[in-house]
Amino acid sequence: MFGPKSPCSGTTVPQLFANHFPVFHNIPTFPHVDIFGILSNVNAHCGQVTANVTKTRVSTNRLLSIVNKQTVVRARDLYRSGMQPEALSRVLRHGLFLKIGRGLYARKDFSADFERQIMLACQRVPNGIVCLKSAVRFHGLLPLDSASIWMAIDFKAKKPVAGGLKLRFVRFSGQALTQGVENIRIDGVPVRIYSAAKTIADCLKYRKKLGGNLAVKVLRESIDRRKCSEQRLRHFARICRVRKLVHAAFSLVARASPTHTHSTNGDGLLS
């Protein structure tokens, strides 16, 4: 109606037609409402909500994928990979997987048999090594039924927190700790366990701690069923300082006739 240089440019309707609009003083004026700004904020908020929902779905799917692949995971490992604690709590509430220990989670069809108990122990104590009774059972030397998982830890190490698991710790040092370790995997989880030969030597060394004639039974079974080579057993017997016991056992076997009956001395050893 008016050009850009019109003298009326910038005036309001009441100013143009002052005689037709009464003037009311002290009446508050309404602030300027930016409807386009409001709509823009609403759209941005809806977009953020959608992004959060998508992010939640991705986090949940990623978490389930990790647990299904690894069977058992530690919470701190999940947090390090960028997983949020809220996602962890959400899947627990929905029963998508199980909490099997302090900071340990597994898929919902998890059942803790003996091998998985070993796996859980190694998850809880990554620097520990399965030993003695648990290693005897794992290698099939004797059908033991121990309620606890035996683990070797460094002589100077701080005693680990069991976190609800039944663990029994024995302190090793030097080559007795580092030699004879086998690295295997159970359900994709790294597990460290002593070899059969090292386990036999350990049982001889800790025969008083194990009780009964367990050490001599393990030694007999290993020789009769040839669970390990004589050379390897003598090697670990030297490390564990039970070389004389192993030498005496093999000397007895070499001298014995097929009808020879083993007897034991006061220490429960072959004689």
Image (cartoon, helix red, strand yellow):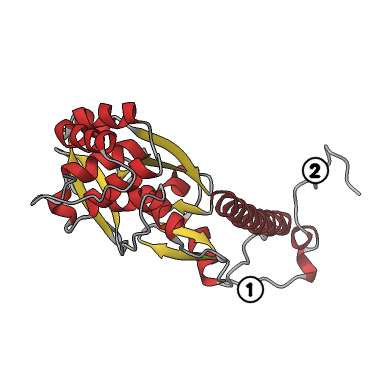
Q: Is residue 29 visible?
A: yes
Q: State whether residue 209 is above or below residue 126.
A: below
Residue at x 55% of width, y 71% of height: 95
Q: State whether residue 49 is above or below residue 196.
A: below
Q: On the rendered structure, is 198 left or right of 60?
A: left
Residue underneath mark 2: 7
Q: Which residue type does callout 2 highlight? A: Pro
Where does residue 243 sit, x and y in percent of width and height?
A: 18, 31
Residue underneath mark 1: 24
Where does residue 22 sit, x and y in percent of width and height?
A: 71, 73
Q: On the rendered structure, is 120 left or right of 96?
A: left
Residue at x 41% of width, y 47% of height: 139
Q: Which residue type does callout 1 highlight? A: Phe
How crowded is the residue under tag 1: few (<14 C-alpha within 10 Å), some, or many (20+)?
few
Where does residue 259 sit, x and y in percent of width and height?
A: 31, 48
Image quadrant in which the C terminus is located: top left
Which of marks 2 and 1 precedes in the sequence?
2
**Between 140 and 170, which is closer to the camera in this rendering?**
140
